[in-house]
Image: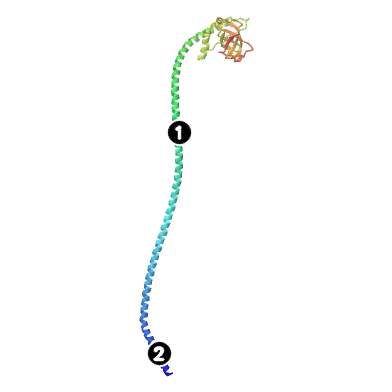
Amino acid sequence: MAVRRIQMDQAESCMRRAKWQAGKMLVPMLGVLAALSMVVAAIAIVLQMQEREKRQAKERELQEAVIENEELQGRLQETQQAKARLEEEFTRTRGELSKTQEQLVKAVEEQTALSKSVEERQQEINHLTSNLTEARSEAKQISAQLAEIQAERDAMKQQLAELETKLSELSGPSEPTVELEKVLVRDDQAQTRELASVLDAPQGSADGQILVVNREYDFIVMNLGKNHGLSIGQEFQVIRGNQVLGKVKVEKVYDELSAAAILPESQKDNIREGDNVRAL
């Protein structure tokens, strides 16, 4: 027992010595570990600060990128709006250009038609100028002829006045009165030809022309007389073309003229100066 106790004491003593030696060695190690811890903490603090600076720098870059992205998006929207406006303006301009082209084509067609019309008008003017020149030449010739006919007309007027006077003087109270109304001498060529036809009537012809129609007393004066073989009581048909208008009966006969009563069955209102008469 004693031996065992001694052994236990020795062992306990050895353990205390070992603990003391271990505790003696542990102090420097703890110091080293504390220093290392401080160094590690300092390094960690430095790294943390660097990491924070990097993170802040990244955040700033990210904010700048976000701002730049927003600016780019704004510019993109402005660009798209400008593009839309340009496309709209281009469409409108293209429509206006199409209308302008149509108007240009129409203007060219109108100009062509106008040029053609001007040419046609110029041709018409030239033709009218030529016709006017011819008409003036004919007018001069007609003026000369009218001057000649004027003299003949004056002579005929005097002759008709003398014949009317003779008819008035020769009309008796016991006979039906047939008066020659005054012959109106107009200044146109047609009336001149009518009056000139008295002189141009062929001698001995049984066909003639009505010179005067008196609707008040229903008688006519025609350019046939004794020189054409007429006699009182002779009847004539009044003709216009192929139409028979009625009959007249001679009541007064002179050398170149005669007066005839319009018979009741005739178309009195339709008979006029210039109608032809033909002996029955």
Tag on residue 86?
A: none
Within-10-Å neighbours for mark 1: few <14, some 14–19, many 20+: few
> Looking at this rendering, what residue extends furthest in the right direction?
265
- Could you say where residue 112 lies in the image, as x and y percent from the top left? 44, 32
SS state under label 1? helix
Say how many tags the image has. 2
Quadrant of image for the C terminus? top right
Tag on residue 109?
A: 1
Q: Amino acid at mark 2?
A: Ala
Quadrant assignment, res 36:
bottom left
- Could you say where residue 75 lies in the image, as x and y percent from the top left? 42, 53
What's the residue at 39%, 91% (across, down)? 10
- Could you say where residue 139 lies in the image, as x and y percent from the top left? 46, 16
- Could you say where residue 184 lies in the image, as x and y percent from the top left? 54, 12
Quadrant assignment, res 170:
top right
Within-10-Å neighbours for mark 2: few <14, some 14–19, many 20+: few
Quadrant assignment, res 204:
top right
SS state under label 2? helix
Residue under label 2: 11
Q: Nearer the viewer, residue 118 or 178?
A: 118
Q: Is residue 116 above or below residue 142?
A: below
Q: Is residue 12 above or below residue 130?
A: below
Q: Nearer the viewer, residue 168 or 35?
A: 35
Q: Looking at the image, tell me whether mark 2 or mark 1 is earlier in sequence order.
A: 2
What's the residue at 39%, 67% (across, down)? 51
Tag nearer the camera, 2 or 1: 2
